[in-house]
């Protein structure tokens, strides 16, 4: 048994209606649906263990979101006092933001969009123009040439593969109609095929 009293609060009719709508929504993110259910059950004075068991989540998840909502009660109450034409939407947005995860900074991208575009552009060129004895680019040669041209300091084969896949570029499939050697060597027989 936990040694402290869980945050206790009551919900206004407006807030309760919004939370009930969130809790049965199919278009809301599932985390907001779950958190809405947590808050509704907490307002019914259920303890965190009961809520966690009923919703199939952890005690700590219930405790965190119950306390987070409790700490935001004043903001929600102030928003409810707003008397504009869009007061219900504004209240809904505030409750949604209270139940949402905070933005996390994340890692800065290693490659700029311009570098990725230049690598993709390079993949569309003939490797023979750059001194390679290849009929088409392979990933390792493409990564090496991108570094040699100064597009990037260095790039892994996996990154090059990811850039090309996202752009839908496959230089190893260069046997298209426009680039076919048969077309240039014997145009008449190419037309017949």
Image (cartoon, grey):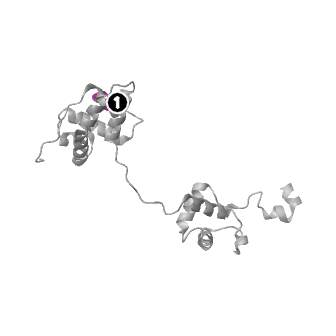
**From the image, which quarter does the C terminus lie in?**
bottom right
| Place of residue 96 in the rendered image (x, y in percent of width and height, measured from the top left) | 35, 37
Q: Which residues are magenta?
A: 16-20
| Place of residue 21 in the rendered image (x, y in percent of width and height, measured from the top left) | 34, 30
| Place of residue 112 in the rendered image (x, y in percent of width and height, measured from the top left) | 54, 60
Tell me, yes or no, if residue 24 can be seen here: no
**Total label count?**
1
Which SS type dominates the magenta stretch? helix
Apparent side of residue 137 relative to residue 86 in the rendered image (left or right): right
Tell me, yes or no, if residue 47 can be seen here: yes
Vertical relation: 7 (above or below) 170: above
| Place of residue 62 in the rendered image (x, y in percent of width and height, measured from the top left) | 24, 43
Vertical relation: 85 (above or below) 69: above
Residue sitting farthest toward the right:
188
Apparent side of residue 70 relative to residue 172 in the rendered image (left or right): left
Residue on which disc 1 sits: 21
Apparent side of residue 190 relative to residue 9 in the rendered image (left or right): right
**At 81% from the left edge and 63% from the top edge, which residue is drawn?**
182
């Amino acid at each position: 048994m936990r040694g402290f009293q869980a945050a206790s609060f009551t919900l206004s009719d407006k807030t309760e209606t919004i939370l009930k709508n969130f809790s049965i929504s199919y278009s809301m993110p599932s985390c907001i649906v779950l958190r809405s259910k947590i808050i509704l059950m907490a307002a019914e004075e259920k303890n965190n263990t009961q809520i966690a068991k009923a919703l199939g989540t952890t005690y700590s998840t219930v405790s965190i979101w119950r306390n987070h909502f409790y700490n935001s009660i004043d903001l929600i109450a102030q928003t409810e006092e707003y008397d504009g034409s869009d007061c219900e939407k504004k209240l809904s947005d505030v409750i949604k933001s209270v139940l949402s995860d905070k933005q996390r900074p994340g890692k800065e991208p290693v490659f700029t969009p311009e570098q990725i575009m230049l690598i993709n552009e390079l993949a569309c060129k003939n490797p023979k123009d750059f001194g390679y004895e290849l009929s088409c680019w392979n990933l390792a040669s493409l990564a090496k040439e991108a570094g040699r041209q100064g597009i990037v300091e260095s790039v892994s084969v996996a990154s090059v593969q990811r850039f090309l896949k996202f752009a839908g570029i496959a230089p190893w499939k260069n046997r298209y109609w426009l680039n076919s050697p048969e077309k240039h060597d014997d145009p008449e027989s190419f037309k017949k095929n």
